[in-house]
């Protein structure tokens, strides 16, 4: 089956656990665009992904540095980008974003990909990406929508080992 997967995460811990699953599934050369408002949980999810990649060091938001690189044990990297303070595609290119969008030696996570639709994740953009959309939901929960290619892997993982506070919901809810 290959359809979008929508999950409701009841707590930060559940989003972290989802990230950990994703981190174990991601491979160098893949780019993941994390869409969502302030506080939606993009950095929390990124932290979980880092854990899943075996990274033990603290993962904080690279809002001011734009990018943070974390070495993995196997010699590859996690590149964590936060484009919040980047105005547009021209500014991103000037900053050297191509190095990360086309990095073969690491997984690249991009917070605020909304800043650069011409470059990332939109039809006809320079680089395709796996997409995750995060939204605030009722009672402090978060809704996370995973692109079909990630959905299958995560669905399988959750079937094998359910995560507390993480439930699949139908698209309309
Ligand atoms: N279910 C949940 N999943 C993730 N975070 C949650 C959840 N419930 C509450 N939170 C809280 O929401 C906040 C999410 O912050 P985070 O820095 O991850 O957001 P962000 O999307 O990266 O925002 P920004 O756009 O500022 O970078 C954290 O303080 C976290 O504790
Ligand atoms: Mg963030």
Image: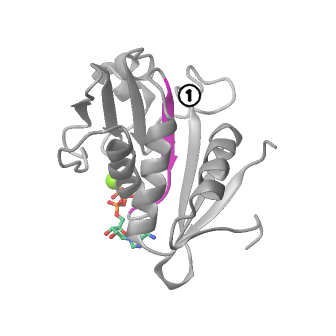
Query: Horizontally, is 106 left or right of 37 in the view?
Result: left
Residue 152: quarter of image: top right
- What percent of the width, then of the height, locates residue 34? 48, 46
Classify 43 as above or below 102.
Answer: below
Given the current orientation, which residue lies at the most extreme right position? 1
Q: Can residue 44 be seen by looking at this rendering?
A: yes
Does the magenta portion include 33? Answer: yes
Given the current orientation, which residue lies at the most extreme bottom position? 139
Q: The residue tagged with tag 1: helix, strand or loop? A: loop
Query: Horizontally, is 107 left or right of 8 in the view?
Result: left
Q: Residue at x 48, y 27 (%)?
A: 27
Tell me where the magenta segment starts and ends, as one range: 30-38
Crowd around label 1: few <14 · some 14–19 · many ≥20 (10 Å)? some
Residue assigned mark 1: 118
- What percent of the width, then of the height, locates residue 159? 66, 57
Residue 38: quarter of image: bottom left
């Amino acid at each position: 089956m290959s359809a979008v997967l929508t999950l409701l995460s009841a707590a930060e811990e559940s989003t972290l656990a989802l990230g950990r699953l994703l981190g174990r599934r991601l491979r160098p050369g893949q780019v993941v665009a994390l869409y969502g408002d302030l506080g939606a949980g993009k950095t929390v999810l990124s932290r979980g992904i880092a854990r899943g990649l075996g990274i033990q060091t603290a993962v904080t938001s690279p809002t001011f540095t734009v990018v943070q690189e974390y070495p993995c044990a196997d010699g590859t990297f996690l590149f964590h980008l936060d484009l919040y303070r980047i105005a547009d595609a021209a500014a991103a290119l000037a900053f050297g974003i191509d190095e990360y969008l086309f990095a073969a030696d690491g997984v690249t996570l991009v917070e605020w990909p909304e800043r650069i639709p011409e470059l990332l994740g939109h039809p006809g953009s320079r680089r395709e990406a796996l997409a995750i959309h995060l939204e605030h939901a009722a009672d402090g929960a978060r809704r996370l929508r995973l692109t079909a290619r990630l959905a299958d892997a995560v669905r399988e993982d959750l079937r094998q080992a359910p995560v507390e506070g993480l439930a699949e919901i139908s698209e309309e809810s």
